[in-house]
Image (tube, grey):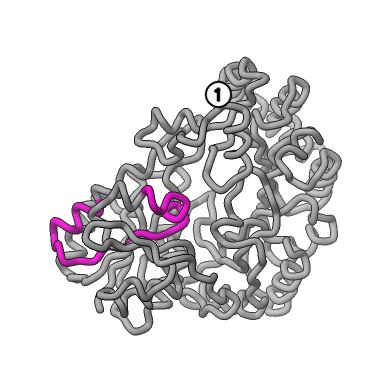
Amino acid sequence: MKVLLIQAYLGRNESDGAIFPLGLCYIATALKKHEVEMFDPNTSRKPYEELTEKIKCFQPQAACISIRNVDTTQRRDIFYYFKTIRPTVQLIKSIDPEIKIMLGGAGFSMFAEKIMERIPEADFGIYLEGEESVPELLNNLNNPENTKGIFSRNNGVLKFTGIRGMPDFTNLPIPRRDLLDIAKYLHPKNNNIGIQTKRGCALKCAYCNYQFLNGAVYRLRSPGSIADEIEYLINDFNIRKFTFVDSTFNVPQRHAEGICNEIIKRGLDIQWSAWFDIKHFSEELALLIRKAGCRNIGFSPDAVTDKALSALEKGITEEDIKKSLHTIKKVKGIKAGYNFFITSPGQDFWGFLKTLALLFKIPLTLMGKGGCRLGWIRIEPYTKIYEIAIKEGLIDKNTELLPENEQQLSMLFYTNPSSKYLDVIARVVLDLVEKLLLPTAKSLLNSVRILLKFRRN
């Protein structure tokens, strides 16, 4: 069967560049008995025109659309990606009504039933991970009820076949990358090519739905398999910069250490970035990952006071954050970015001021080796924040978390009801800081660094 795999069109060009569709590559690799092609409209200047041409030339019998995110989740950059999905489905059906359309991806699974209701032209929905369910469904298109983890329609009535067990990720083959022009995903500042070393997350952050999407039990790939994939990227595509796309690279820590040691053992000349859990970060680990090629670290402590950290169920303390800053400052060759929420459960006025101060404290402490980003929590299903927001009266059980437009989306960000005035202040301050004060501070910092370098010479 001819199968066209399509990354969902975001509806705009992202300043950070297009993200390589790793999830679709895993699906493509699983479809060994089918003729597969891929299309990513996010790398196209004329996405709908090129998709039309692709369908007419390839003439697929099935099209799978991967929905990674339904929106930006950024309150100061509100944009609703999901509005492109139904037009894409309708376009495909207008070209050939016989093409069976499947929707999947993390964004789909969070709102699966609602999305199937809103897009009646879609024939099937792939719930959660699809490496096993997609091939099985393609072999049973006339009897979808035989495949677990599938939404389908029977005489116009939406049916769900039941939850399917998670695939054995530890033994999945290395995902093929040859169906797309990988050069289109190279970005001068960002590593948009991803490698996944594990699925599942045992952390319990209140705003996160990773456990719903991938489970709470880690499914770990072997360090050897990961090193093989890195060599595949080097040898076949000359890719030496990438990102480990795990929720947290260093949990479990021994797994991360094993990967780094295997990279070092093979002498792989690479540069990579990853998200790290602060609690399991140490100077010893920092030295090891630097030797293995890590150059950029992402931390997401999310709150700055012990009270707010506890409310977000982060499992860390303010002291842990301070220690991580000290380690990054001490270890040369690694930069770090920190994410915080400007308003969260447990946040008081003192915590609010300390959070704003981080915009300056972190860049100054790290002397150009890192920075800080502040945002708001997007309320999403299957999270503790959703329950907190209902309890505090910000939303109710009838609130639709899959909005119709940007205006509705703007109402789905958590604001602490005990300090709503701080929310207004924060937005004004962030505009002032980012447009005026931070550029000035960066300019002064660069001048100081140049002066210190000149004096040493």
Location of mark 1 (residue):
435
Say whether residue 450 is visible. no
Say whether residue 339 is visible. yes
Residue 367: x %, y % from top left: 75, 38
Residue 39: x %, y % from top left: 31, 62
Lateral position of residue 75 relative to residue 1, left or right: right
Q: How many marks?
A: 1
Residue 80: x %, y % from top left: 39, 39
Corner quadrant of residue 303: top right
Magenta segment: 88-114
- Farthest bottom residue? 33
Location of the N terminus (image quadrant): bottom left
x 55%, y 22%: residue: 431
x 61%, y 60%: residue: 246
Picture layout, residue 75 above or below residue 113: above
Location of the C terminus (image quadrant): top right
Judge whether residue 103 is colored magenta: yes
x 36%, y 58%: residue: 7
Q: Which is more toward the observer, 250 or 179?
A: 250
- Classify mark 1: residues with Cα within 10 Å, few (<14), some (14-19) or many (20+): few
Q: Describe the element under mark 1 as helix, strand or loop.
A: helix
Residue 238: x %, y % from top left: 49, 71
x 51%, y 80%: residue: 173
Judge whether residue 157 is colored magenta: no
Picture layout, residue 377 above or below residue 132: above
Q: What kind of residue is marked 1? A: Lys
Corner quadrant of residue 349: top right
